[in-house]
């Protein structure tokens, strides 16, 4: 037609096609109900409570970051 | 021209239909809430951690830090042009790596402890062998056309990078070449996190979206929206089934991967500072989030409540990390100090 290059519009079409492909992929996933998945997350936290030192607290004697003060017998 | 316009219109119509389909599917899965599920769980009470060490050594803003898998060594990166490897038990500096470019934004420790990687405004991810007599540059991964915002080792032979050029990339360290380029974000990628099983990774970007990728396939599997500004920080919940994000919109969010949507929002009306970094405690119950307000605030990940704060830095908290053994939290700041708390 006129001197306009069609490459710009081809690019937009390719971009739109890619977007459609991506959305198709994302739309196809099987989603699980929040009532089930949330309960699962809660259960994980509860099951791993005891192996979470920041939650349980750390005894001074086994604290690797605590400054060790040596006892001196006078 | 008319044919192209017709095709564009058809494609746009299909996009809209697919988006509606996704929203409907999410709505159908939205039959409960995190608050309801966490209703019967005991509160964690007030979490009060003490400052155990103040690590001095850097001469300028600290931008990033990462724990070694041994939960004892830690590497930090500062715009003073150095990486420092610390023995956190003694507070001693073990190794100093001078950087070619001082504008560093990210640092990582390989699981083996042999290598560290860093990168920033030079657009390059440089990998160093720190077990050599003096730190030796192993590889310069140079292909991104934007700044390197984040790098994460999968092993001594593979590393993932996130860049301001809107892509993420999987590199082969033996050849120094790109294996897979992950394209889909429309804004600078700011952060990435590997899933516990290392088959997936999640990225956060300035397009305010978080995306889940298959490491081997290269495909973007899921996209999470909700934030209204750049996502600066991202981490997997330890079970691998949820993701926590931190954003310039001053909030953190939890996205459930299997329900494919946001399930919790961590906001406080008194908190008007952007989130720069975040890390989870070992059970996933506590979220340590670094903010521009100079503090690291602690959130109960299940109940969405603020349960504590780590105060002491004199400038923005830029990085936060919890070691594998979960024995403490490290915060790094623009005030040039790293602090260890537990």
Image (spheres, rainbow, N blue to C red):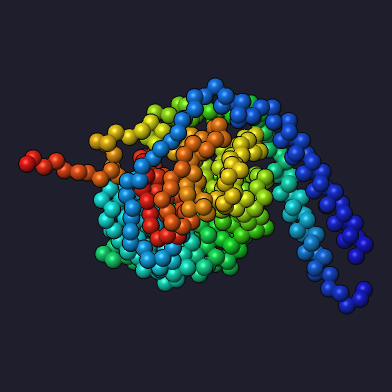
Looking at the image, which is closer to me, B240 or A50? A50
Residue A7 in sight here: yes
Which residue lies at the image location 93% right of the left edge and 62% below the top edge?
Answer: B2
Give the image quarter of residue B244: top right
Q: Is residue A61 above or below residue B149?
A: above
Percent of width and height locating residue B237 = 51, 38
Q: Quadrant of the N terminus of chain A?
A: bottom right
Horizontally, residue B321 falls left or right of residue A29, namely left
Percent of width and height locating residue B307 = 49, 36
Q: Quadrant of the C terminus of chain A?
A: top left
Q: Is residue B281 above or below residue B114?
A: above
Which residue lies at the image location 74% right of the left edge and 49% below the top edge?
Answer: A21
Horizontally, residue B146 falls left or right of residue B333, namely right
Which residue lies at the image location 73% right of the left edge and 30% below the top edge?
Answer: B28
Which residue lies at the image location 36% right of the left edge and 68% below the top edge?
Answer: B98
Q: Is residue B92 above or below residue B221?
A: below
Residue B70 in sight here: no
Percent of width and height locating residue B204 = 59, 51
Looking at the image, which is closer to me, B320 or A20? B320
């Amino acid at each position: 037609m006129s001197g306009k290059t069609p490459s710009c519009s081809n690019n937009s079409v390719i971009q739109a096609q890619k977007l459609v492909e991506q959305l198709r992929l994302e739309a196809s996933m099987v989603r699980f109900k929040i009532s089930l998945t949330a309960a699962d997350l809660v259960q994980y936290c509860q099951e791993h409570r005891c192996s979470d030192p920041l939650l349980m607290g750390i005894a001074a004697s086994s604290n690797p970051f605590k400054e060790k003060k040596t006892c001196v017998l006078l | 021209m008319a044919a192209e316009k017709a095709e564009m219109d058809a494609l746009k119509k299909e996009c809209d239909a697919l988006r509606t389909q996704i929203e409907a599917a999410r709505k159908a899965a939205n039959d409960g809430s995190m608050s309801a599920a966490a209703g019967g769980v005991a509160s964690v009470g007030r979490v009060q951690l003490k400052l155990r060490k103040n690590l001095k050594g850097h001469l300028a803003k600290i931008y990033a830090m990462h724990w070694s898998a041994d939960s004892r060594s830690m590497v930090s990166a500062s715009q003073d042009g150095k990486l420092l490897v610390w023995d956190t038990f003694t507070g001693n500096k073990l190794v100093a790596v001078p950087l070619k470019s001082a504008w560093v934004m990210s640092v990582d420790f390989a699981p083996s402890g042999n290598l560290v990687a860093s990168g920033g405004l030079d657009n390059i991810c440089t990998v160093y062998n720190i077990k050599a007599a003096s730190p030796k540059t192993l590889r310069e991964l140079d292909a991104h056309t934007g700044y390197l915002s984040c790098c994460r080792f999968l092993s001594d032979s593979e590393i993932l990078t996130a860049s301001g050029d809107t892509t993420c990339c999987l590199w082969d360290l033996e050849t120094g070449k790109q294996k897979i380029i992950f394209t889909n974000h429309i804004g600078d990628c700011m952060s990435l996190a590997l899933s516990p099983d290392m088959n997936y990774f999640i990225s956060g970007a300035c397009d305010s979206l978080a995306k889940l990728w298959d490491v081997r396939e290269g495909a973007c599997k899921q996209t999470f929206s909700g934030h209204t500004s750049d996502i600066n920080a991202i981490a997997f919940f330890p079970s691998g089934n949820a993701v926590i994000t931190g954003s310039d919109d001053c909030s953190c969010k939890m996205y459930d991967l299997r329900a494919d949507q946001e399930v919790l929002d961590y906001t406080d009306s008194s908190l008007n500072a952007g989130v720069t970094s975040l890390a989870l405690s070992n059970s996933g119950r506590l979220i340590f989030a670094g903010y521009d307000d100079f503090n690291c605030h602690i959130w109960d990940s299940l109940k969405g409540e603020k349960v504590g704060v780590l105060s002491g830095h004199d400038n923005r908290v830029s990085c936060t990390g919890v070691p594998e053994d979960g024995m403490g939290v490290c915060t790094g700041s623009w005030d040039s100090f790293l602090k260890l708390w537990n």
